[in-house]
Image (cartoon, rainbow, N blue to C red):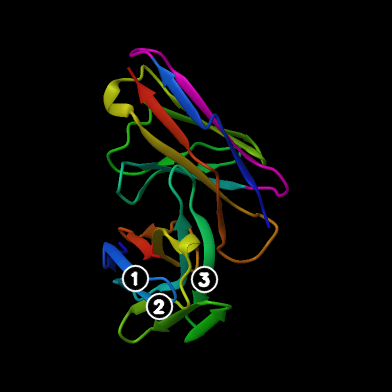
């Protein structure tokens, strides 16, 4: 089955700097890669996703890149702000989307 | 965007009692809903897949008699933790997929913090 690895587990960056979170996946059949943001005591919220027919996707300060050959994908947050502090999860699923497998999460802290 | 409502947000119960958690899709129909469990500072662990009108599919190691799932309509799935024990204390989260929209997007509820005394 699919296995998703995520790193780093914690990340602290200065406000205004960029943050990068990386994930790898094992199943070459996976073709959908969402990223979720989870704040304390709340459910995850989808912030951006990418499909395997695309190498990069951007939405304002957030971008995701995908290297299908190497089976890794990354989340990039630019011009970080205090409200970006949260736990971020990457995930992967195949075209049937019967399951979405989550990475272990990254706790991002933005230093003022 | 699609909204998934989960209730209650927090519940405290005594050992041996049963607790029901509801997951509703408010503005879309969901033939499939998923139930997750999350321990502090850990990732989401898929417990079961809930299919409207049929039996749920449980992940390996999850007791189906312990965690009863009912998905009786296209907008509601319930998870009942039966004879709860302190080790069942956890954060439970549901998610749903829009049956009428192509794609794999999952929308999550706000979670339920269960504390068993």
Tell if the residue under mark 2 belongs to the same chain as the one under mark 3.
yes
Establish if A43 lies above or below B83.
below
- Cβ–Cβ below 8 Å for labels 2 and 1? yes
Please give the chain letter of the residue carrying mark 1: A
Q: Which residue is mark 2?
A: A17
Q: Which residue is mark 3?
A: A49
Q: Secondary structure at mark 1?
A: strand
Residue A14, position in %: x, y? 36, 72
Q: Distance from label 1 to label 3 (Cα)? A: 23 Å
Residue B88, position in %: x, y? 32, 28
Residue B100, position in %: x, y? 70, 57
Q: Secondary structure at mark 2?
A: loop
- Cβ–Cβ below 8 Å for labels 2 and 3? no
Q: Which mark is residue A3?
A: none
Which residue is farthest right? Answer: B27
Quarter of image, res A109: bottom left
Residue B101, position in %: x, y? 68, 62
Q: Is residue B22 magenta?
A: yes
Instruction: Indicate the quadrant containing the C terminus of chain A: top left, top right, bottom left or bottom right.
Output: bottom left
Please give the chain letter of the residue carrying mark 3: A
Please give the chain letter of the residue carrying mark 2: A
Ranked by sequence position, the earlier of labels 2 and 3 is 2
Q: Is residue B45 magenta?
A: no
The residue at the point 45 percent across, 42 percent down is A41
Comparing labels 2 and 3, the label whose residue is closer to the camera:
2
Q: Which residue is mark 1?
A: A13
- Of the pair B104 and A24, the residue shown nearer to us: A24
**Mark 2 packing: few (<14 Cα in 10 Å), some, or many (20+)?**
few
**Mark 3 packing: few (<14 Cα in 10 Å), some, or many (20+)?**
many
The boundaries of the magenta stretch are B14-30
Left or right of A63 in this view: A1: left
């Amino acid at each position: 089955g699919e296995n998703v690895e995520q790193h780093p587990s914690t990340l602290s960056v200065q406000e205004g700097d960029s943050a990068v979170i990386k994930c790898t996946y094992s199943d070459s059949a996976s073709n959908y890669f969402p990223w979720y943001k989870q704040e304390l005591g709340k459910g995850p919220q989808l912030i951006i996703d990418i499909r395997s027919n695309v190498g990069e996707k951007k939405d304002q300060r957030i971008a995701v890149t995908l290297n299908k050959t190497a089976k890794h994908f990354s989340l990039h947050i630019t011009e970080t702000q205090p409200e970006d502090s949260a736990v971020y999860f990457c995930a992967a699923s195949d075209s049937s989307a019967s399951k979405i497998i989550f990475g272990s999460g990254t706790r991002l802290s933005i230093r003022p | 965007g699609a909204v998934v409502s989960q209730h209650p947000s927090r519940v405290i119960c005594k050992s041996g009692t049963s607790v029901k958690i509801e997951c509703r899709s408010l503005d879309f129909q969901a033939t499939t809903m998923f139930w997750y469990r999350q321990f502090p500072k850990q990732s989401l662990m898929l417990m079961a897949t809930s299919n409207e009108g049929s039996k749920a599919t449980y992940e390996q190691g999850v007791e189906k008699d312990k965690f009863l799932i009912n998905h009786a309509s296209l907008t509601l799935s319930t998870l009942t933790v039966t004879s709860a024990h302190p080790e069942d204390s956890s954060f439970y989260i549901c998610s749903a997929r829009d049956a009428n929209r192509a794609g794999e997007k999952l929308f999550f509820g706000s979670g339920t913090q269960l504390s068993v005394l």
